[in-house]
Amino acid sequence: MEELGSTFAVQLFIYDLSRGMARQLSPIMLGKQLDGIWHTSVVVYGDEFFYGGAGISSCPPGGTMLGPPDTVVELGNTEVTEEIFMDYLSSLGETTYSGDKYRLFEHNCNTFTNEVAQFLTGNKIPSYITDLPSEVLSTPFGQVLRPILDSIHIAPPGGNVIRSQNHQS
């Protein structure tokens, strides 16, 4: 049991899924510069938590196939206990962030990370990450690609899906 008044560091892990290709190709394809195609996760209590097509998952920090993050941002500290946090994640996983609700542009890993960061610290993740989908969709090429991209469900391999204690199989 954690002591009363304990705080826990909360970090944002940022990965560029394009591995630098967005920076090179976006001016040609979209007519605007994008620095990356961002996947984010929250690291707290010694684990990395993220959302994808499989639902909410966790792994040791940097433990997905993506490897170590490109950038780490300190989001602050939380007084929320791990037990309360895991109950919160289980609830989100059964409702708002089940795998079938994943949508690449509207309801993705960054939407999840932003919500979790606010729950834990009161801080949002950087807007250059949350604004990326609207930046892409504001271009003619983004509109052409939307039907294809909407069918993509990103779920980085290497995580364990978080399930409710009542519904584990």
Image (cartoon, grey):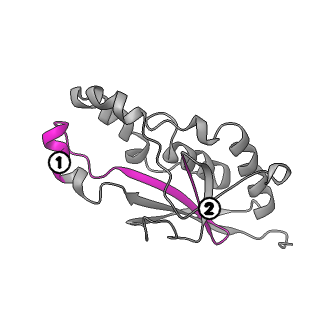
Query: Which image quadrant for residue 28?
Result: top left
* Rendered location of residue 123, percent (x, y): 57, 51
Q: Which amino acid does label 2 sit on?
A: Ser
Label 1 secondary element: helix
Q: Is 49 situated above or below 54?
A: below
**Residue 57 placement (x, y as % from top left):** 61, 56
Image quarter hosting the C terminus: bottom right
Mark 2 element type: strand
Quote the CA–CA distance across marks 1 and 2.
32 Å
Q: Could you say where residue 76 lies in the image, as x and y percent from the top left?
A: 58, 62
Asked whether 48 falls inside the magenta stretch, the response is yes
What residue type is disc 1 on?
Answer: Leu
In depth, the one of 101 and 9 nearer the eye is 101
Magenta segment: 24-52
Q: Residue at x 67, y 49 (%)?
A: 119
Residue 33, image x, y percentages: 20, 45
Residue beneath disc 1:
25
Q: On the image, which quarter does residue 42 sit in? A: bottom right
Vertical order, 146 against 34 (above or below): above
Q: Residue at x 34, y 29 (%)?
A: 146
72 or 77, which lies in front? 72
**Is 51 left, or right, of 27 in this rendering?**
right
Q: Is residue 40 left or right of residue 159?
A: left
With 93 as the anchor, is 26 left or right in this view? Answer: left
Q: Is residue 116 magenta?
A: no
User: Which label was assigned to residue 58?
Assistant: 2
- Assign the N terminus to one quadrant of the image: bottom right
Q: Count the labels in the image.
A: 2
- Quick one: which residue is furthest to the front in this view? 169
Image point (59%, 71%), residue name: 60
